[in-house]
Image (cartoon, coloured by chain):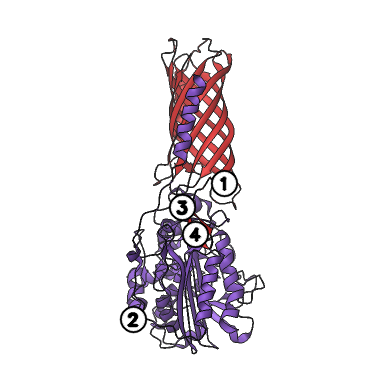
Chain colours: A purple, B red
């Protein structure tokens, strides 16, 4: 009798454990968007086949855009929403992760052009004394060192308490100030200017500095100074965790075995100016081309020629690729990566973004006047590997061979 | 929280002035508890939602010596950690208990068992190039635990006394339930429960 009772309880418990949250039923029209652009590129069929192959390889969905003097192409493959099998469309919007940092860099450089700050200014000049006192070397680190990741500041991602808080409350928005708290009074990783290490907190601080100088929120600054002038009508900055229905769902391969789980809510927890923008490839193309064009609506001075000029550091530069990719990172300039192709005419300026459930990449190849943007609604595990292979090896062949 | 724990322990020590000498060897009890689970060592991290779970355990008194007794629990537990994961475990837990004359009880508990972690959302697997929802049987793992707690026994002179208890436990789960790049997860469980002596 006792054994029967115990087995009954055992059954109840394992039945409970088998319960999973079912995905919401979404109608396809939620993701409907307008794309009036026509594909004119002679290699359009090849490009279409390329992204379809990447989806067959394992990416849940992706959009890509290529614009060059030869023609224009934009395509989509896979699904915006897996449980409802809603196909991805070119105009669908997605998290762009750290590509946001280039938008923040643009705001800062606009302020430099306007004479409201200088690249050699130390950051403590633009922070409240109370805040500056809690950030190591705030009286030494310059704006330039924040832009090119030579500040030596610790990153909130490296703080175990950050990981615990994030996983204990995954849908709770983490504001810029909360991200900063994880590095308060943390020792520097290196003396400012001596090494280069990609650090999210640099752009969290640059966002706060831009807000402090202008007295406007990040959302207003992006809207007034970038989105609106460029007609980026499908781009916005999220500072809360309400997820617009039109955003494609983001999937994570957490176990590294191509078993995907929806992590859209977790991606929307990050709300700082280091990674909070949502956009599509059509808007990103407008932005990429405007950034690299002097007088293109964003930056008016010759500073556009220096965006990805990498100043040498006396010690290590951890932003340079260590793998033998045919297209690889060769350091960071004023918020933009210097990207080296397998031949000098294939060099580019660009930036990638990766956050839970999403990946993004934008680049401009000056020698061939080619713009490339892509968005993927998956990351982690094998999806990261697929994206690395695509960017590191396959893109050069796709674009130039 | 640590300070509150120490204070409670001191209170028990002060109010305890004589020891019970009743014989409770070969007793069997059934206990139930509810608990809040979190990653890390803090039972209630600031601002975090509750991650509720529950246990049912059957316990056998193995050894009794004055106020001290050793009890073996076979415990079945379940908890859900937000959208991250859910887990069910079955563990053997030896408990070392001091039952004082005034009804208060202190105990330390260790444990070893099997934990099965499951996703708490639908997962998708690629088949013929298309991802579709798939049954996920989860991930097996080991669990070790250590904890301490206190309780109060009601009806200690009756045949079947009832004990209310509070216990802080820490679980070490390997492999970590979420990502294989982490070898080990540490979870904190703050339990409130009741133990019913059966016979």
What residue is shown with label 3? A166
| Mark 3 chain | A
In terms of depth relative to the viewer, which is nearer, A291 or A357? A357
Q: Chain of mark 1?
A: B
Does residue A30 appear to the left or right of B122 in the view shown? left
**Earlier-in-chain disc, 2 versus 3:** 3
Which residue matches tag 1? B176
Please tell me which residue is depicted at 49% across the width and 23% down the height of the picture. A4
Q: Which residue is mark 4?
A: B131
Q: Are marks 1 and 2 in contact (CB under 8 Å)?
A: no
* Residue B189 in the image, given as x and y percentages of width and height: 48, 37
Quadrant including the C terminus of chain A: bottom right
Viewer-side label of 1, 3: 1
Cα–Cα span, label 4 and label 2: 39 Å
Q: Secondary structure at mark 2?
A: helix
Is residue B149 visible in the rendered structure shown here?
yes
Alpha-carbon neighbours of circle 4 within 10 Å: few (<14), some, or many (≥20)? many
Task: Give the residue furthest to the front.
Answer: B128
Q: What residue sits right under mark 2 in the picture?
A: A229
**Letter of the chain that mark 2 sits on in the rendering:** A
The answer for how far apart the CA atoms under marks 1 and 3 are is 16 Å
Residue at disc 4, secondary structure: strand
Residue A66, x across and y down, in percent: 48, 81
Quadrant of residue A330 within the rendered picture: bottom right
Looking at marks 1 and 4 on the same chain, the residue that comes earlier in the sequence is marked by 4
Residue drawn at x 44%, y 27% is: B32
- Callout 3: few (<14), some (14-19), or many (20+) C-alpha neighbours within 10 Å? some
């Amino acid at each position: 009798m006792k054994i029967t009772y115990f087995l009954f309880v055992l059954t109840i418990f394992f039945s409970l454990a088998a319960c999973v949250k079912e995905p919401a039923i979404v109608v396809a029209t939620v993701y409907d968007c307008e794309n009036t652009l026509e594909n004119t590129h002679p290699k359009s069929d090849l490009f279409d086949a390329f992204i379809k192959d990447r989806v067959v390889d394992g990416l849940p969905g992706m959009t890509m855009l290529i614009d060059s003097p030869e023609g224009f192409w934009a395509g989509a493959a896979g699904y915006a929403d897996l449980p409802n099998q809603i196909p991805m469309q070119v105009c669908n919007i997605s998290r762009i992760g750290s590509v946001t940092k280039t938008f923040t860099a643009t705001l800062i450089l606009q302020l430099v052009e306007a004479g409201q700050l200088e690249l050699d200014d130390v950051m403590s000049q633009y922070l409240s004394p109370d805040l500056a006192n809690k950030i190591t070397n705030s009286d030494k680190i310059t704006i330039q060192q924040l832009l090119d990741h030579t500040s030596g500041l610790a990153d909130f991602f490296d703080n175990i308490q950050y990981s615990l808080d994030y996983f204990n409350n995954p849908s709770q928005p983490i504001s810029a100030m909360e991200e900063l708290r994880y590095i308060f009074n943390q020792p520097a990783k290196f003396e400012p200017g001596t090494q280069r290490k990609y650090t999210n907190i640099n752009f969290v601080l640059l966002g706060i500095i831009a807000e402090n100088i202008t007295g406007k929120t990040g959302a207003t600054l992006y809207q007034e100074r970038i989105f609106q002038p460029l007609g980026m009508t499908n781009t916005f900055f999220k500072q809360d965790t309400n997820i617009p229905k039109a955003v494609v769902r983001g999937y994570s391969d957490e176990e590294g075995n191509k078993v995907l789980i929806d992590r859209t809510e977790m991606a929307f927890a990050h709300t700082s100016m280091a990674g909070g923008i949502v956009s599509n490839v059509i808007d990103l193309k407008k932005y990429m081309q405007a950034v690299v064009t002097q007088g293109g609506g964003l930056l008016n001075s010759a500073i556009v020629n220096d965006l990805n000029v990498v100043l040498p550091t006396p010690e290590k530069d951890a932003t340079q690729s260590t793998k033998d990719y045919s297209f690889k990172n060769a350091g960071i300039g004023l918020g933009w990566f210097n990207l080296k192709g397998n031949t000098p005419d294939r060099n580019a300026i660009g930036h990638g973004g990766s956050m839970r459930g999403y990946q993004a990449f934008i680049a401009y190849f000056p020698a061939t006047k080619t713009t490339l943007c892509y968005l993927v609604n998956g990351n982690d595990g094998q999806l990261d590997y697929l994206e690395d292979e695509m960017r590191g090896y396959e893109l050069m062949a796709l674009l130039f061979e | 929280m640590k300070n509150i724990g120490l204070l409670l322990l001191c209170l028990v020590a002060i109010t305890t002035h004589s020891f019970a000498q009743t014989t409770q060897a070969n007793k069997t009890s059934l206990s139930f508890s509810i608990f809040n689970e979190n990653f890390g060592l803090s039972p209630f991290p600031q601002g975090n939602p509750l991650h509720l779970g529950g246990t049912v355990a059957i316990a056998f008194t193995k050894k009794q010596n004055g106020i001290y007794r050793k009890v073996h629990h076979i415990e079945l537990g379940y908890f859900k950690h937000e959208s991250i994961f859910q887990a069910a475990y079955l563990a053997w837990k030896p408990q070392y208990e001091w039952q004082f004359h005034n009804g208060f009880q202190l105990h330390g508990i260790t444990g070893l068992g099997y934990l099965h972690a499951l996703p708490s959302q639908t997962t998708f697997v690629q088949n013929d190039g298309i991802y579709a929802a798939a049954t996920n049987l989860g991930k097996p793992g080991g669990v070790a635990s250590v904890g301490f707690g206190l309780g109060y026994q009601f009806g200690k002179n009756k045949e079947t006394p009832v004990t209310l208890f509070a216990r802080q436990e820490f679980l070490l789960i390997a492999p970590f339930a979420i990502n294989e790049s982490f070898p080990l997860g540490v979870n904190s469980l703050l339990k409130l429960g009741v133990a019913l002596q059966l016979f």
